[in-house]
Amino acid sequence: MVEKYKKEVANDVVFNLEYNSERQRLIIPEYGRHLQKLIDQATAIEDDETRNKAAKYIIQVMGSLNPHLRDVPDFQHKLWDQLFIMSDFKLNVESPYPIPSREVLELKPDVLQYPQNFPKYRFYGNNIKYMIDVANKWEDGEMKNALVMVIANHMKKSFLSWNKDTVKDDVIFEHLYELSGGKINLLHSTEELLNTTDLMRTNKRMSNKTASVGQPKIQNNKNNKGGQKKTFQKNNNQK
């Protein structure tokens, strides 16, 4: 019996299986392992002319995966950059575009500055902080006192939007004192904010208005029982 037609031992087959975890890591997995092997073979070619031809052939293969973008100049630049990246920057060929470097590729972008000034009390929002900063610049007087009370009432309403339980005015005054950097102090003030019930009623009314936007209105005809359309009947007694 020919050797290749002999029945293989199942244990040997399982033992000799090659798993992807044991193979070389793919730098850009989207192109697959066969293309990675082509690039590795092209990198090992010693002749410069043959290596350049192999690189151009690989670029054609990479472009064939996206035929609708193959002839776009920017896309060709992207393919050449990916070719050098997949070769681990070891491929020495002539490129029509600037060859990327490992240092430029590993550069990290700058950290984005998000407009978040006080992450401790996020439920108040940034506008409250801006209003507090404006109130700190005003001179003491009736206008500033009125603005401070408006800010405090709005803080209480925002607090109740996220926490449905009742909140004491002292808590709002403490947060206002902290957010203003100690410049607005109402801890020992006799002023009282709006009632919690009124603020909750306001929040509920605004939420109902928001939910009703875009919903069709349903007319309920009380006189028409059963939901049937009332037909017109001609009165024959009229002359």
Image: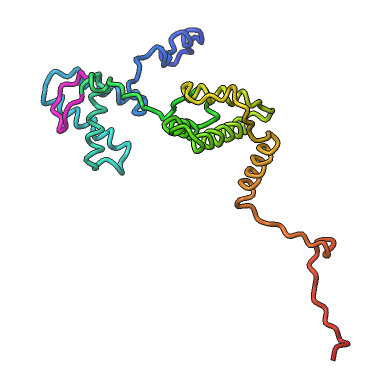
User: Magenta residues?
Assistant: 89-100
The x, y position of residue 161, in whole percent, is 62, 33
166 vs 68, nearest the viewer = 166
Rendered view: 95 above or below 203: above
Q: What is the number of callouts on the image? A: 0
- Residue 61 seen in the figure: yes
Which residue is found at the position 64% from the left and 49% from the top?
A: 212
When asked about the image quadrant of residue 38, the answer is: top left
160 vs 198, nearest the viewer = 198
Q: Is residue 153 left or right of 113 when viewed as pictured?
A: right
Which residue is found at the position 69% from the left and 40% from the top?
A: 201
Magenta stretch: dominant secondary structure: loop
Q: Is residue 147 left or right of 80 when viewed as pictured?
A: right
The x, y position of residue 55, in whole percent, is 19, 28
Residue 92 lies in the magenta-colored region: yes
Residue 182 lies in the magenta-colored region: no
When asked about the image quadrant of residue 59, the answer is: top left
Colouring convention used in this rendered image of the protein: rainbow
173 vs 8, nearest the viewer = 173
Which residue is found at the position 26% from the left and 37% from the top?
A: 75
